[in-house]
Amino acid sequence: MKTAIKFFFTLAITLISQIGFCQNPIIRDYFTADPAPIVHNDIVYLYTSHDTASVESKNYEMKDWLVFSSTDMVNWEYQGAPISPKTFSWATGDAYAAHCTERDGKFYFYVSTFHKEDENSKGGAAIGVAVSDNPTGPFVDAIGKALVVNEMTTDNKHGWDDIDPAVFIDDDARLPDGQGQAYIYWGNGSLKWAKLKENMIEMDGPINYLNPENFIEGPWVYKRNDLYYLLYASKGEKAEQIDYCIATSPEGPWEHKGVIMESVPNSFTVHPGVVTYKGKDYFFYHNGVLPTGGSYRRSICIDYMYYNEDGTIQKVIQTEEGVEAVQ
């Protein structure tokens, strides 16, 4: 009996080790992209795009946004699809990259999709904001119209430059109510940014324009110690890679520091997301390595992120092993 128990125990440990040896991609039941992780109440919530294109498709098909949660960075629980472009009466088209953040107990979900032709816009990419009392939704349109329409930005001629929103709340810049100043960053072809009012659903000032070196899309902004970091999808030799800049203010000026992750396998695009969780730094991205995967059927991965003493970021190493479970 003891021998049998020992055998099955050893087998279980071996299976666990084998499963843990190849964590990436972290989600295998859905094709997911554009990771947007946040930490709330010691739980990591991961908001994702959802690729539903067929294997033969030559373009994106993305009908909703998904939410997953984890308390160990390895096991991810599906929390549903609490929001889609149908949430917004003004929207049409697909569900491109999005970002969620919490303030005053409410969760604000910033999305990129396309706008119907109406009295508010002639069409093109637009950014909306939805709100919920729960990180897993359901979400409802917070203002009944788009936060950003194509006509509001004029530096690019193409109609899809208002995509990929990312929101950052700077706790070092206090508003009259004592809370941090919120910023929204977005763009394709150029980077746009603006302040948000305390209510998180209105701009507070003009839209500003930046052209970071090799910038394409997918900005992600955060603060670590006394430095602000801007990560984004950039021009690689054949496909997007991840570049980053550093500043001493969320408004810049931004100093380009180079590439932190090379292009990913089997996907033209890549999109960054960063969290610190229980003392470790994690880098989220997507690739196209799952069976039948590709540029329109992508999958999210996680690897460790490390910093040098001066605050610069070390190259992120893409692995199949991924990260270890947090105890």
Image: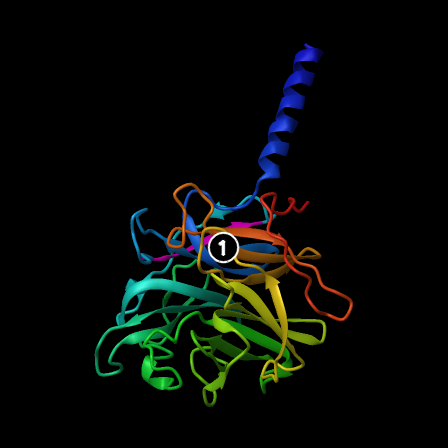
Residue shown at the point (33%, 73%) measured from the top left: 125
Q: Quadrant of residue 221?
A: bottom right
Residue shown at the point (60%, 58%) measured from the top left: 283
Residue 45 in picture, x, y percent from top left: 52, 56
Q: Is residue 246 visible?
A: yes
The residue singled out by tag 1 in the image is 286
Furthest residue to the bottom? 205
Along the horizontal axis of the image, is 248 left or right of 83? right
Residue 103 in picture, x, y percent from top left: 53, 71
What amino acid type is highlighted by mark number 1? His
Q: Which residues are magenta?
A: 63-70
As helix, strand or loop, the secondary structure at mark 1 comes to: strand
Residue shown at the point (51%, 68%) measured from the top left: 234
Residue 304 on the magenta span: no
Furthest residue to the front? 237
Quarter that holds the C terminus: top right
Residue 144 in picture, x, y percent from top left: 31, 75
Q: Residues within 10 Å of mark 1 (few under 14, many from 20)?
A: many
Quarter that holds the N terminus: top right
Q: Nearer the viewer, residue 25 or 255?
A: 255
Q: Is residue 105 visible?
A: no
Q: Quadrant of residue 179?
A: bottom right
Residue 159 in picture, x, y percent from top left: 32, 76
Residue shown at the point (45%, 60%) measured from the top left: 269
Q: Is residue 279 above or below residue 15?
A: below
Q: Nearer the viewer, residue 56 or 73?
A: 56
Furthest residue to the right? 309
